[in-house]
Image (tube, rainbow, N blue to C red):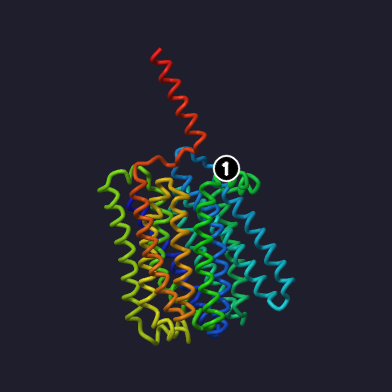
């Protein structure tokens, strides 16, 4: 039964990875290289916002679902929090569109895209926490078909990148709202704020990690856009997206495996390394298979999918493969640490490594364009994987959360009093 559930979960991640590739393939059929760069910039920004909100709500919900004191009502609170943030960001985008009239269409389309993606993603993480993998697969298949169809339809209408983003946001919103009814989820926005405050220790550490990664990744995007070229940015994002089949292993570990893993599974040294080896092999297999397929893809077929951008992309496949492999390796100890209840200690490690990363990623992008950015990020991911693995091993067998000093004193006082009374 568990094999079937994991298989469905892996297929589900494959569907989402395919969607991220199809977004770019479909857009490339109608847009020039420069226009595709604009579409990629908007989509990258929307996905960045999605990752930050997911850290605030969805990832915390998954970690909470592994705890004994998890309440089913937390799903509705988490979803309500996601919707509240989506409305707030949408309001900011509308305000920016009036403040910067020359970029009105871009900000409005970005507001629509991020809103739809946040609605759909919020419902999706609530569904993941229920363990209903079959229903989750159906939801993501419907989302992929409708969102890809909306981008294609926008292209047929002759719309530019901002029009495609608008259609993508609208379709994602429709799918997300429909899924709320299907999964019987009633968002509770105000309760979501209280849920956020109650579990701020988890939320804050995950958000801090997401912000660090987002700032680093987005700085590379902006450098490529303004100091390299729109086509180079499009090639960078397209190369990472076409390696999206490797992301299915990464996201599979961060969702389905995280949901089912328990601290007891990591107590024994042999079990710990066996699970880490199995997960690492999964990452290596998906990266290797993707690279072999792309390396042997006929040039005519690649050009038909990505247009002018394909020529630049071909030279990035080796660097992109290394990037995705080490990114996947860094996720394995990340999953272990979340199951072990290690939050801010892991975040502090990420802060140190990411600060070093600012001397790698953006500088690599500035000096060597897209290939330099990919290789520099790969080195950063390797450093992160090694550092987090050391922390995870040192944390094995420790309690989920360290006691605060006042609570520790109270506990020691209670133990001393109990001991004295027993001696009397």
Q: Is residue 238 visible?
A: no
Figure quadrant of residue 45: bottom right
On the picture, is 216 further left or further right than 116? left
Residue 413 or 338: which is nearer the viewer?
Answer: 413
Residue at screen point 40% across, 84% down: 301
Measuring from the top left, give residue 377's x and y in whole percent: 42, 70
Figure quadrant of residue 331: bottom left
Measuring from the top left, give residue 417's x and y in whole percent: 45, 20
Measuring from the top left, give residue 71's x and y in whole percent: 52, 40
Q: Is residue 319 visible?
A: yes
Measuring from the top left, give residue 237's x and y in whole percent: 48, 75
On the picture, is 281 further left or further right than 204? left
**Circle 1 residue:** 198
- What is the quadrant of the C terminus in the image? top left
Residue 274 or 269: which is nearer the viewer?
Answer: 269
Figure quadrant of residue 12: bottom left
Residue 167 or 48: which is nearer the viewer?
Answer: 48
**Looking at the image, which residue sits at the far left?**
270
Residue at screen point 67% across, 66% down: 93
Tally of marks: 1
Whether residue 394 is situated above or below residue 177 in the rendered picture: above
Q: Badge 1: few (under 14), some or many (20 or more) residues near its Cα, within 10 Å?
A: few
Residue at screen point 38% across, 69% down: 379
**Looking at the image, which residue sits at the far top?**
424
Secondary element type, mark 1? helix
């Amino acid at each position: 039964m568990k094999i079937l559930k994991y298989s469905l979960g892996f297929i589900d991640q494959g569907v989402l990875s395919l969607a991220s590739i199809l977004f770019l393939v479909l857009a490339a059929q109608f847009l020039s290289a420069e226009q595709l760069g604009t579409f990629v910039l908007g989509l990258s920004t929307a996905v960045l916002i999605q990752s930050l909100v997911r850290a605030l709500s969805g990832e915390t919900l998954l970690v909470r679902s592994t705890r004994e004191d998890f309440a089913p009502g937390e799903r509705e609170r988490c979803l309500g929090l996601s919707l509240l943030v989506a409305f707030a960001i949408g309001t900011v985008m509308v305000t920016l569109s009036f403040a910067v009239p020359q970029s009105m269409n871009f900000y409005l389309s970005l507001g629509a895209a991020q809103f739809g993606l946040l609605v759909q993603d919020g419902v999706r993480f609530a569904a993941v926490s229920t363990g209903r993998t079959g229903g989750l697969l159906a939801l993501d298949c419907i989302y992929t078909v409708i969102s890809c169809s909306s981008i294609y339809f926008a292209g047929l209408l002759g719309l530019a990148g901002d029009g495609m983003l608008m259609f993508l946001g609208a379709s994602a919103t429709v799918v997300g709202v429909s899924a709320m009814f299907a999964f019987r989820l009633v968002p509770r926005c105000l309760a979501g704020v209280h849920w956020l405050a109650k579990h701020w220790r988890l939320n804050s550490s995950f958000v801090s990690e997401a912000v660090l990664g987002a700032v680093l990744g987005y700085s590379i995007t902006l450098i490529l856009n303004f100091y390299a070229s729109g086509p180079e940015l499009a090639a960078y994002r397209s190369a990472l997206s076409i390696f999206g089949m490797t992301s299915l292993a990464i996201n599979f570990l961060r969702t389905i495996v995280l949901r089912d893993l328990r601290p007891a599974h990591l107590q024994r040294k042999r079990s710990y390394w066996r699970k880490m080896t199995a997960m690492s092999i999964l990452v290596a297999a998906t990266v290797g298979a993707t690279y072999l397929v792309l390396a042997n893809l006929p040039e005519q077929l690649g050009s038909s999918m990505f247009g002018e951008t394909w020529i630049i992309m071909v030279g990035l496949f080796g660097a992109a493969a290394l990037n995705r492999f080490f990114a996947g390796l860094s996720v394995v100890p990340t999953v272990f640490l979340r199951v072990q209840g290690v939050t801010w200690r892991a975040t502090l490690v990420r802060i140190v490594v990411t600060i070093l990363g600012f001397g790698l990623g953006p500088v690599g992008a500035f000096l060597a364009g897209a290939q330099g950015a990919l290789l520099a990020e790969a080195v950063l991911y390797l450093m992160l994987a090694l550092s987090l693995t050391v922390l995870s091993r040192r944390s094995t067998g420790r309690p989920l959360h360290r006691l605060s000093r006042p609570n520790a004193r109270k506990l020691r006082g209670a133990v001393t009093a109990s001991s004295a009374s027993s001696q009397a």
